[in-house]
Amino acid sequence: MGPRNYRLANSWREWRLRAVVLPADRYIHGAATSRYQWGDDDDQSPASGGKHLNLTTRERLFGYERALDHPVSVEIVACVIVGLAIAGVLILVLRSRMREQSYRVVFARWRSWCWLVGVIIVPVLAGAAWTMLAVMLLSLLCFREYSRATGLFREKTICAVIVLGILMVTFAALDHWQDDRLFFALGPLTAALIVIVSIPQDRPRGFIQRVALGVLGFALFGFSLGYISNFANIGRLAGSGPDYRPIVLLLIVGVGLNDLFAELVGKLVGRRPLLPSTSPRKTWAGAIGALLLTTLLVTLVGHRLFAGTPIDHPGWLIGLGMLISLLGQLGSLTLSSIKRDVGVKDIGATLPGHGGLLDRFDSLVLVPPAVYHYLSLALGENGPLGADQPYRILTGSGG
């Protein structure tokens, strides 16, 4: 055997040795868990403070190639695109029957929906890191609208703490501590810091109002929306289920359709207002119709999405649909209460035909935390969500 063939043979034997023997040696037990973390050939494990992300983590964070691996992701994206296309065609067909002003309003709303769909769906499909970045930007923009509507923007120190809190929530989701300890700790810690930085100003008059506005703003737009970033830590639900993409898409699309169902049913058969002083256009019929239709939709889609996991049970699926519908409607009513309190119709003017981002995403503000903990509870010993992925991928620890 010549020198070149000898080197090739040795390289082949070495590769097989590394592929078969080394992975068994590189399983690393977490300090307080029976789950494992691993690295590829040139990586050190994140759990031991390694400098590189392992292959599994890199694929989750940046692996756009797996964007449409799950059929539910394909179906949701296809349905959204087809729905927008049909809506656009109908607007053009009916243009001759509409007044010019009405047409412009409807077309502006449709165009805003097209923009929103791209901004929402593309980062989710592109990878977990892009999803987290998009959520962070959404949180910052929503808080900006909230602070301007309520006058909180004048309190520079409180606003700086909230912005810092939003950035830390994103970092905590990306770093992914065991059982999300850092993420959960940031809620009370940021709220406490808002109180603390307000004390040295020596302005007791209005203290409660300033602090309450700050805590509420962070809770709704920093911490609650930040849970969507935590969903992006799902690699394989319960070890064999879907990754985060179809779950996040179902969450967002489910909330959006819940709004649509409430509006359509309310216009068709709604008579009695739900809360006339808070939101005059919402009706009892619309609320009940949305609850029934959203629950049915989430149950049917969830059965396919969560097949083979503990969540795939009629009780859990029906409960999930009801949770998304009820909290979606309550989130909308929460923002309606804020708008009525400060005396504005729309919180912003970012989206033509919709108002501000908060006017469009109001129904989402209460849903992510409840769904996250609900699914984690349903998983039982396979939970919480994201438990299948390596911990502390940036800071490095046994975890």
Image (cartoon, helix red, strand yellow):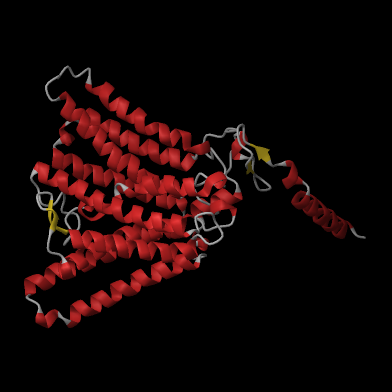
**Above or below, comparing residue 268 to residue 97 in the picture:** above
Residue 123 visible in rendering: no
Q: Nearer the viewer, residue 19 or 227?
A: 227
Question: How far across and how far down the image is residue 214, in percent?
Answer: 23, 33
Q: How many marks?
A: 0
Q: Residue at position x 23%, y 62% from top? A: 262
Residue 158 x/y as whole percent: 24, 30
Residue at horizontal 30 percent and vertical 29 percent from the top: 191
Q: Quadrant of the C terminus?
A: top right
Whether 176 is drawn above or below 275: the answer is above
In this rendered view, identify the residue nearer to me: 127 or 208.
208
Q: Nearer the viewer, residue 363 or 282?
A: 282
Q: Quadrant of the N terminus?
A: bottom right
| For residue 53, side relative to residue 265 (left or right) | right
Q: Quadrant of residue 197?
A: top left
Q: Position of residue 29 (x, y in %)?
A: 66, 37
Given residues 102 and 133, the one toward you in this image is: 102
Residue 299, x across and y down, in percent:
41, 62
Q: Is residue 285 visible?
A: yes
